[in-house]
Amino acid sequence: MNPEPLLLATSSGDVLKLRPEGPWIAANVTTLETLSRSVDAEVDRSRAVSLDMSGISALDTLGAWILEKLSRKAASSGRPAEIMGVADHFSGLLEEVRQVNRHTPPPAGASNPVLLRLNDLGKATIGAREDIAIFLQMLGALFMAVAGVLRRPHSLRLTSLVYQLNRIGLQAIPIVILITFLIGAIIAQQGFFHFRRFGAESYTVDMVGILVLRELGVLIVAIMVAGRSGSAYTAELGSMKMREEIDALSTMGLDPVDVLILPRVAALVIALPILAFIGSMAALYGGGLVAQFYGDMGPAIYIARLHEAISVTHFEVGILKAPFMALVIGIVACSEGLGVKGSAESLGRQTTTSVVKSIFLVIVLDGLFAIFFASIGM
Amino acid sequence: MPEPQAEFAIRVRDLVVGFGRQTVLDHLSLDVRCGEILGLVGASGGGKSVLMRTIIGLIPRRSGTIEVMGQTIGAPHDRSRAATWGILFQQGALFSSLTVRQNVQFPLRENLVLSQELMDEIAIAKLEMVGLRAQDGDKYPSELSGGMTKRVALARALALDPPILFLDEPTSGLDPIAAGDFDALIRTLQKTLGLTVFMVTHDLASLTTVCDRVAALADGKIVAIGPMRDLLQSEHPWVRAYFHGKRSQMLQPQMR
């Protein structure tokens, strides 16, 4: 019941007679394309073309377009194709197809690869400048929001703040403990293994204590929070933006920064130091366990060595950095979230950007703090 | 287009669909003739979209049979059915990561083997047929207005020249002029392509101007079906309330 489409071409004198037959429909498109290509050369050679449509059993837009293309090809070199035998119920469709594709859009200007590169570079530079501007804008908006809350303390969204604290603080504790514990243990194991060669095993405790309290505890926790909570912030705000929820808030006279962003960033600023503290303790505990079972150093000696090696300053240096890192993570996550455009793809892209950017900035910030604390002698 | 031997494009018999304890469609039967535009009206939340989605296989049915173009509808995700119908979803449901042209080409690319050049030409032809310009092809769905989104969605639904077109509230969210244009467009395409159109709508103007027949869905059943004129005479209380309510009365002079 499914005959193949055919295209019979016969030349009589100068006239090329084309007679399409069978079903010229989308399902046969592969055959149709081959058929129309096979007569291209003949259409070019012949003086006049006539198209006899009477053999067509079924026709749709695609088939009609392929026939239309053939007749246009003939017409373009001044030999208008004569079309005949059009069945009544196809004439409307053929007429419709005759109207389309008349205005080919101007081809995009040829692109010079060097110019293209320069163009990209320029766009990236402007993009970077805009990123800084957006960051500063968000920082300013947050300060204004904080100032507003200080003036009218009851305007703080306490419920939202507590909810966010639970989500990004309390619920993050198990994974933070697990990972920092493992990292503390690994550092201690490496210390014992390598320091043993020149009999400096007892200094492993100094290394673990200082490294964990000053740098690693807060850095690892900040990176984890950026991945865990920063991405969630971006995705939440982004999908709210897509569904016009944020616009709805603004039209009701509420500032999205007050309602959505301040509780989130404040929760991060409060939670990150606490998480960093818990993480540091877990890392020291992990180091202690390794000291006992791998380094043959009892808990009493481990704690005594720690007591000698570290001071409150080391702890302060670590924990002081945490709120600033939280602020950076929060601002990046929220402003990337608000940057989401309409598409699902854009949401994914912004979430990735948010995590990558906040981890990068956390590490840069850590470096700046290292320089700062070194120069003030902490 | 020569119509297949079947007189009915869609035949629904004793269809029962429900969720949990709730029964939405209760032994519903409906026939859609080949080449007609059937409008389906019903209360909001009354099962119009459920009926449409059940026919196209998105919602499982409890019992009953559905035949489309003479073939019984079985398991969902059947590839061959893609060429049987095109669907215009209420929100357009365009793929947001593809351009307009790629959206229209998507069914072609997935179901047929053809050259990129021909695919581009077909896509532009479809866009022009629904009243868009070739330049619009490079835009992304997020850059389109509501009316353009509907037109692109229609072009995508028509990409494979399906014999049946399902429209879910095609004119909702459009201003009366754009809605009128859209109705005229559906009418023209239906004539040139010989389509059967199944249209869920609340737009009384669309019902009067483009629909050959109107079916009214109430209490999970089709309570009245026929040309608009007949439905206006219907004695069923819900149908009367629908067509003779305050809002409908304002349109009555034109209807008669």
Image: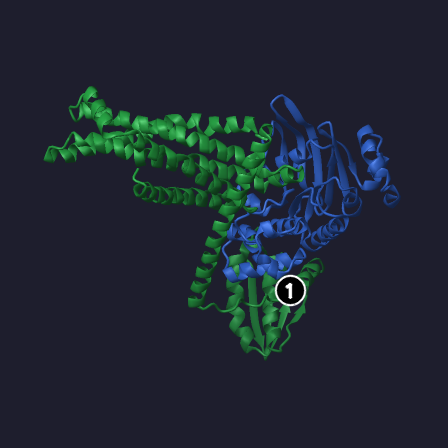
Quarter of the image for residue A10 reads: bottom right
Single out the residue that lies furthest toward the front: A376
Q: Please tell me in which quadrant of the rendered image residue A144 appears.
A: top right
- Rendered view: A211 above or below A52: above
Whether residue B188 appears in this view of the structure is: yes
> Picture coordinates of residue B11 (x, y %)?
67, 37
Left or right: A43 as drawn, with respect to A359? right
From the viewer's side, name the closer residue of A115 and A37.
A115
Look at label 1 and name its amino acid. Met
Q: Nearer the viewer, residue A248 or A104?
A: A248
Name which quarter of the figure residue A186 lies in.
top left
Of the 4 image quadrants, the one containing the C terminus of chain A is top left
Residue A104: % across, % down: 60, 66
* Residue tagged 1: A53
Residue at (84% x, 41% y) in the render: B229
Left-right relation of B17 to A121:
right
Is the residue B93 above or below the residue A204 in the image? below
Q: Nearer the viewer, residue B170 or A285?
A: A285
Which chain does the residue under circle 1 lie in?
A
Colour displayed for chain A in the image of the structure: green
Provide residue B90's location: percent of width, then percent of height.
65, 42
Q: Colour of chain B?
A: blue
Q: Is residue B214 left or right of residue A103?
A: right
Figure disc tally:
1
Q: Is residue A22 visible?
A: no
